Image (cartoon, helix red, strand yellow):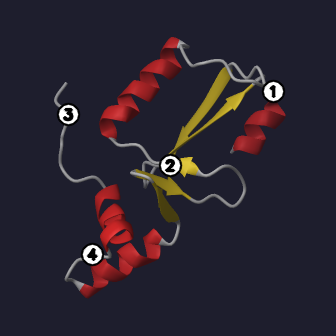
Amino acid sequence: MQIDEDLSWQDPIIDYLMNGNLPTDKSEARKIQQKAVRYYMHGNKLIRRSYSGPHLTCIKYPQTLEVLCKIHDGSLPPTPTKKDMMIVATDYFTKWIEAEALSSTKEADVERFI
């Protein structure tokens, strides 16, 4: 499989948060500024703020494959709360991935996640 090393959607946001750089196009610059409000940098990691749950670490394509393989193989590390199942959803338009560890697959747990 060929991995495309082009710029990620994260790169303009990271560049703005770390260096204050914006595109010269005013419309694109405004979009980056509006998106950047939902993120912050922790070291060299881009983190998305979440108001209803934990903050989310943004990962790039090569890491995405690694995480998905671990999920499918069931080789995730054990958690202190004995959560040994994972539910994952991907937004159709933005391709944003959200995942949550679960201790059971009850209907109420799935409804709460969605």
Task: Name the front one of labels 2 and 3.
Answer: 3
Please tell me how crowded label 2 is: few (under 14), some (14-19), or many (20+) other residues with Cα within 10 Å. few
Tag 2 residue:
91
Q: Are marks 2 and 1 in contact (CB under 8 Å)?
A: no
Q: Are marks 1 and 3 in contact (CB under 8 Å)?
A: no
**Residue 3 - label:** 3
Report the amino acid beneath label 4. Answer: Asn
- Quadrant of res 103: top right
Q: Earlier in the sequence, mark 1 or mark 3?
A: 3
Q: Identify which residue is drawn at 73% across, 23% down.
A: 83
Element type where label 3 sits in the image:
loop
Q: Earlier in the sequence, mark 2 or mark 1?
A: 2
Report the amino acid beneath label 1. Answer: Lys
**Residue 71 - label:** none
Please tell me how crowded label 4 is: few (under 14), some (14-19), or many (20+) other residues with Cα within 10 Å. some
Tag 1 residue:
106
Q: CA distance from mark 2 to mark 1?
A: 22 Å
- Quadrant of res 63: top left
Q: CA distance from mark 2 to mark 3?
A: 21 Å
Element type where label 2 sits in the image:
loop
Q: Identify which residue is drawn at 45% across, 70% down.
A: 35
On screen, residue 102 above or below 8: above
Q: Nearer the viewer, residue 71 or 19?
A: 19
Horizontal and vertical percent position of residue 9: 32, 57
Q: Position of 49 compared to 43: left or right?
A: right
Please tell me how crowded label 3 is: few (under 14), some (14-19), or many (20+) other residues with Cα within 10 Å. few
Q: Are marks 4 and 1 in contact (CB under 8 Å)?
A: no
